[in-house]
Amino acid sequence: MVQLKDITIIESGTSQFRINEAQGEDAPIRFFYGQAELEADLTSLASSIDPKQIRTNDEVSTLKDGDLVFSLISGKSTIVKPWHEGYVFTQNYVRIVPAPLIDSCFLAYLLNENEEIKRQLAIGQQGSITLKYTVKQLSSLQIPNLPPIKRQKIIGDLYFRQLKLAALEKRLADSETKLVLQRLKEACD
């Protein structure tokens, strides 16, 4: 087994408290990458929540389509979708750049679903009330032996397709429930 830091580059996000808000309208508007965006990227379904934004001229860490992101708050990882390109990621998120021997989607699958990795993350959580993962803890994760890259790509692709399918099925079930409840309400009136 190897540690995550041996097969990736881990980049911390910009400290949100160090970003200076600009007053003029000539400063670009930046959107923050948050938990809603991460969940949307996991399911490949757009979020209905408006992202936080700021006007700033500061240099900030931004995401690109295809980046692997890990939330130090939730312990989940995903691949950034095109609609979140250019979003600012704060100190609560890290970008993980895998070496060529590991597929990004497969690594997201491992970080989210592997029982041994979940155990390692649970052991080292920080905080008494609000639990948070650390970059050091993430870096020192022991990664199991990797299958060939071709198999990694298949597993990673199937993983994200399954998450999208499950989200679509849930959305459909929720819509059907709302429809039936609305019809029941109308029948009572």
Image (cartoon, helix red, strand yellow):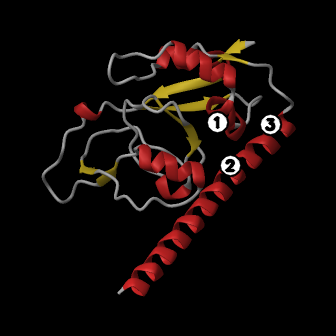
Is residue 81 positioned above or below 5 on the image?
Answer: below
Measured Cα–Cα span from mark 1 to mark 3: 11 Å
Mark nearest the camera among 2 and 3 is 2
Judging by the rendered image, the residue that carries numbered circle 3 is: 152
Q: Are marks 2 and 1 in contact (CB under 8 Å)?
A: yes
Judging by the rendered image, the residue that carries numbered circle 2 is: 160
Q: Are marks 1 and 3 in contact (CB under 8 Å)?
A: no
Q: Which numbered disc flags the more N-terminal residue, 1 or 3?
A: 1
- State the image quarter where residue 3 is shown: top right
Q: Percent from the top left, x then y, of residue 162?
A: 71, 51
Q: Percent from the top left, x then y, of residue 72?
A: 45, 28
Few, some or many residues within 10 Å of mark 3 (<14, 14–19, 20+): many
Q: Percent from the top left, x then y, of residue 7?
A: 68, 21
Q: Is residue 52 left or right of residue 124?
A: left
| Residue at (50, 61) in percent of width and height | 46
Mark 1 residue type: Ala
| Residue at (12, 51) in percent of width and height | 23
Residue 68 at least partly seen:
no
Q: Which numbered disc flags the more N-terminal residue, 2 or 1?
A: 1
User: For numbered disc 1, what is the local secondary structure?
Assistant: helix
Q: Is residue 150 left or right of residue 86?
A: right
Q: Is residue 146 left or right of residue 137?
A: right
Residue 136 at least partly seen:
yes
Mark 2 residue type: Phe
| Residue at (34, 59) in percent of width and height | 50
Specify the farthest residue to the front.
188
Quadrant occupied by the C terminus: bottom left
Is residue 10 positioned above or below 57 on the image?
Answer: above
Judging by the rendered image, the residue that carries numbered circle 1 is: 108
Q: Percent from the top left, x then y, of residue 103?
A: 73, 36
Specify the farthest residue to the left.
23
